[in-house]
């Protein structure tokens, strides 16, 4: 069965304090790993897609990396506006219709 | 930019009412999805549609039905709303078959309260 596990559940940082969020996955035949940002009361906003081990993607203070078993979302010198829940997801194995399996998310809070 | 819109941001309904949630996407996507999101349970797939008039059950379809008469529009129907259907409902869309891109794009969500 496909599984996506995110850690930690919650992360509190001071502004400027860099850190990483983890997403571990188990799926047959990885067809991409996705990171989303979700603000309270809103829908998830797509951030990145990673397809193969060793791949990296960057957007402002965020960098996503991928290995064969996990992905990291590195946050460099975060600002309070980076506070959100970060979700990762993988396409469910054995389907061609793009069903996604989501992790539970990491709630990031950045204090000024 | 992909645009997914949902008919209401907030909705309050009474137990037993029939509820319609509408979702529209403007990117000619073939696949559309309805999720609900609850604290501690994450995102759970209710139904999805891979083409017009085509639908498949997700992980928690009980108490829900869907309709897709046009490619851009996907409706979620609560046949007889119950309090345990109070939740955040999220619609998403994705380009269909013939693409290797599986990322989904989400709407803003509808916060439904059933009293």
Image: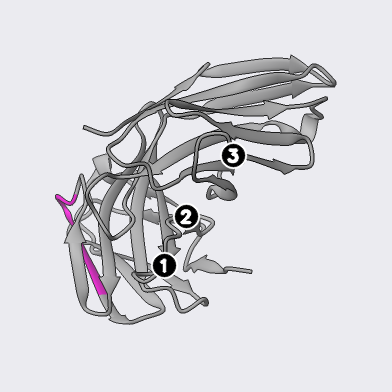
Residue, disc 2:
B103
Q: Chain of mark 3?
A: A
Q: Say which mark, if any, is on residue B99.
A: 1
Q: Residues at badges 3 and 2 in contact (C-beta under 8 Å)? A: no
* Residue A106, horizontal then vertical, whole percent: 54, 25
Looking at the image, is A12 positioned above or below residue B15? above
Q: Which mark is residue A55?
A: 3
Q: Is residue B4 left or right of residue A47?
A: left
Relative to residue A85, is residue B102 depicted above or below? Answer: below
User: Of helix, strand and loop, which one carries label 1?
Assistant: loop
The residue lying furthest to the bottom in this view is: B70
Residue range of the region highlighted in magenta in the rendering: B61-67
Whole-angstrom CA distance, mark 2 to mark 1, is 11 Å
Q: Chain of mark 2?
A: B
Judge whether residue B62 is colored magenta: yes
Quarter of the image where one finds residue B93: bottom left
**Residue drawn 41% across the image and 59% down it:** B91
């Amino acid at each position: 069965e496909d599984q996506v596990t995110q850690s930690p559940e919650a992360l509190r940082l001071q502004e400027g304090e860099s850190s990483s969020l983890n997403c571990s996955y188990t799926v047959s035949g990885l067809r991409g790993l996705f990171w989303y940002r979700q603000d309270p009361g809103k829908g998830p906003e797509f951030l990145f897609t990673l397809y193969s081990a060793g791949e990296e993607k960057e957007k402002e203070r965020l960098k996503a990396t991928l290995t064969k078993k996990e992905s990291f979302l590195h946050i460099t010198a975060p600002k309070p506006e980076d506070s959100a829940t970060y979700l990762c997801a993988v396409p469910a194995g054995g389907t061609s219709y793009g069903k996604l399996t989501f992790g539970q998310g990491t709630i990031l809070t950045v204090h000024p | 930019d992909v645009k997914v819109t949902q008919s209401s941001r907030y909705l309050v309904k009474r137990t037993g009412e029939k509820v319609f949630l509408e979702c529209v996407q403007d990117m000619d996507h073939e696949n559309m999805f309805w999720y609900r999101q609850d604290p501690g349970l994450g995102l759970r797939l209710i139904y999805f549609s891979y083409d017009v008039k085509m639908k498949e059950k997700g992980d928690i379809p009980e108490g829900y039905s869907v309709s897709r008469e046009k490619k851009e529009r996907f409706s979620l129907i609560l046949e007889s709303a119950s309090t345990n259907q109070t939740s955040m409902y999220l619609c998403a869309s994705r380009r269909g078959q013939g693409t290797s891109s599986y990322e989904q794009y989400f709407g803003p969500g509808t916060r439904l309260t059933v009293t």
